[in-house]
Amino acid sequence: MIKIKNLTKIFTLGDNKLIALNNLSFLVSSGQFLAITGISGSGKSTLLYQLSLLDRPNQGTISIDNINTSKLTSGERISYRLKNLGYIFQDYAILPTLTAKENIMLPLLMQGVKENIAQEKAKEALLKVDLQDRLDHLPSQLSGGQQQRVSIARAIVHNPKILFADEPTANLDTESSETILKIFLNLHKQGQTIIMATHELDYAKLAERNIELRDGLIISDTFKKK
């Protein structure tokens, strides 16, 4: 599904240049659950942002379903992200003034989906993360783990081709983290392609593939034995 070729990202800090990603090339198959690991500063979040089209690389190409995304205009990239990709962030990134259901409806409404249909799809997504009894709660009325589950529901409500998760358990306790990973594993069993950046090696081991980065380079690329 994803083909990465010679991917390079360089940050300029004054007179200094930091090579965050150094000429990476690899493939990601449809339906794969990939964990990207590495110590802080290894480049894992930077790589996730390139793959998810939230940032542009300095060099190299990222093709998704044979579409060379480097050739897309800014408007086309926004439209592609909205229709085809789902995002989960460590800080949840849900709007505090909207209920759980309203937060989940938002990306659908932005795509022009009718409100009554968006409401039903939001309820279905909340059911998938076992929060069907919290649809009218504001984020302030939810625990951190519940807020992250709302974030997951919002990310999957439009059936994205790829689900991206950047340190999704970083702010959660062990019980909530395990709940989040169980949801990911269930989605993966249903065929969802998932790419997750994490520093939690125990959680990374649950994925079927693990790419470890160091100084912007891939130092290992392993698949879980079946």
Image (tube, rainbow, N blue to C red):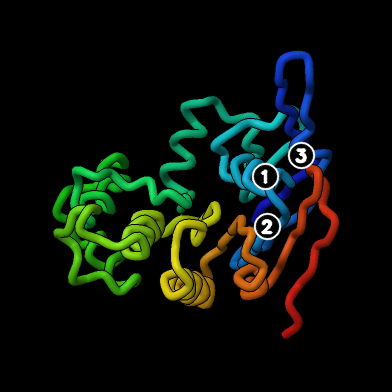
Residue furthest front as drawn: 173
Q: Earlier in the sequence, mark 1 or mark 2?
A: 2
Mark 1 surroundings: few (<14), some (14-19) or many (≥20) residues within 10 A = many
Q: Nearer the viewer, residue 133 or 146?
A: 146
Residue beneath label 2, please? 36
Residue 150 in which image quadrant? bottom left
Q: Earlier in the sequence, mark 2 or mark 3?
A: 3
Q: Which numbered disc covers residue 21?
A: 3
Instruction: Identify the residue at horizontal 48%, vertical 49% (top origin).
Output: 85
Disc 3 marks which amino acid?
Leu
Q: Nearer the viewer, residue 111 or 55?
A: 55
Q: Position of residue 198 (x, y in %)?
A: 61, 58
User: Judging from the image, what secondary structure is the residue with disc 2 in?
Assistant: strand
**Residue 191 located left or right of residue 68:** left
Residue beneath label 1, please? 47
How far is the residue under mark 1 from the one under mark 3?
7 Å
Q: Earlier in the sequence, mark 1 or mark 3?
A: 3
Disc 2 marks which amino acid?
Ile
How far is the residue under mark 1 from the one under mark 2?
9 Å
| Callouts 1 and 2 close, C-beta under 8 Å | yes
Instruction: Identify the residue at horizontal 74%, vertical 55% (top origin).
Output: 27
Q: Nearer the viewer, residue 221 or 97?
A: 97
